Image: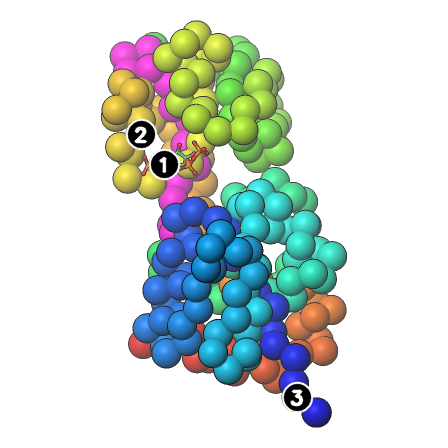
Amino acid sequence: MKELPLTIALPKGRLQKQVQELFAKKGIAFDFEDRKLVAYDKDKQFKFILVKNSDLPVYLKHGIAGLGVCGSDVVYESGDEFYKLLKFSFGGTTMCLAGMKGCDYSESDRKLTVATKFTKFTEDYYSKLGVPVEIIKLNGSVELAPVLGLAPYIVDLVETGSTLKANNLEIFKKLQEISVYLLANPAYFKIHYKKIEKLVEFLSED
Ligand code: PRP
């Protein structure tokens, strides 16, 4: 009987390209043609599913994808627990508190108003510090918030820093390093661990 492919969810956007390049470098080429959201490699060893970044934990939790490539930021927001199989060398970012350049931010501010996509992270981070925080939830282009006066501060990911710079913003505090991992649904891992371990080994080789 022909073996079923391993299912791997990939996030749309920046990471997608980097994962495709890594697999291609290892001799496994695949492409999402004509805006299709499912792709296979030539030997049908892998079935790749292209999903919105923040939805990836949903597919993984429900076992629709057994494996997934996802940042620790997104997993934290989901509140789900997955097996971390591999930390990738690409996609590292920093979760930061930022605001308008020159704004007199002080660690001892009694209350912070923060616009962010990362509401759980922000809530938990400041509650551990005992700092009350009012959170305004956004779904993207968070940098607009201080520029337009929606909130003086944002908590967001900074990679190159160019979005902050272009909008006259600066980092006030680095809150957490974020990495990208190959994750597994625990039940799926238990069933397919032999094939998964081979994949991990294969992806880790230089
Ligand atoms: C992320 C992040 C910042 C930007 C940082 O947004 O939320 O906006 O990238 O990258 P940089 O430091 O290299 O400029 P993303 O591109 O995912 O889009 P979004 O604004 O729609 O969330």
Give the distance between the C-alpha atoms of the residues marked 1 and 3, in whole angstroms: 44 Å
10 Å crowding of disc 1: few (<14), some (14-19), many (20+):
many
Which residue was labeled with disc 3? 2
Residue 200, percent across and down?
A: 49, 75
Give the distance between the C-alpha atoms of the residues marked 1 and 2, in whole angstroms: 8 Å
Q: Which residues are magenta?
A: 91-103
Residue 76: mark in rendering: none
Q: Is residue 33 magenta?
A: no
Which residue was labeled with disc 2? 163
- By what rule are the colours in the image chosen? rainbow
- Please report contact status of discs 1 and 2: CB closer than 8 Å, yes or no: yes
Quarter in which the N terminus is drawn: bottom right
Give the distance between the C-alpha atoms of the residues marked 2 and 3, in whole angstroms: 48 Å
Residue at 26% from the left image edge and 32% from the top image edge: 162
Residue 47, percent across and down?
A: 57, 69
10 Å crowding of disc 3: few (<14), some (14-19), many (20+):
few
Residue at 62% from the left image edge and 33% from the top image edge: 120
Q: Secondary structure at mark 1?
A: strand
Q: Type of residue at label 2?
A: Thr
CB at mark 2 closer than 8 A to ligand 1?
Answer: yes
Residue at 70% from the left image edge and 70% from the top image edge: 188
Q: Earlier in the sequence, mark 1 or mark 2?
A: 1
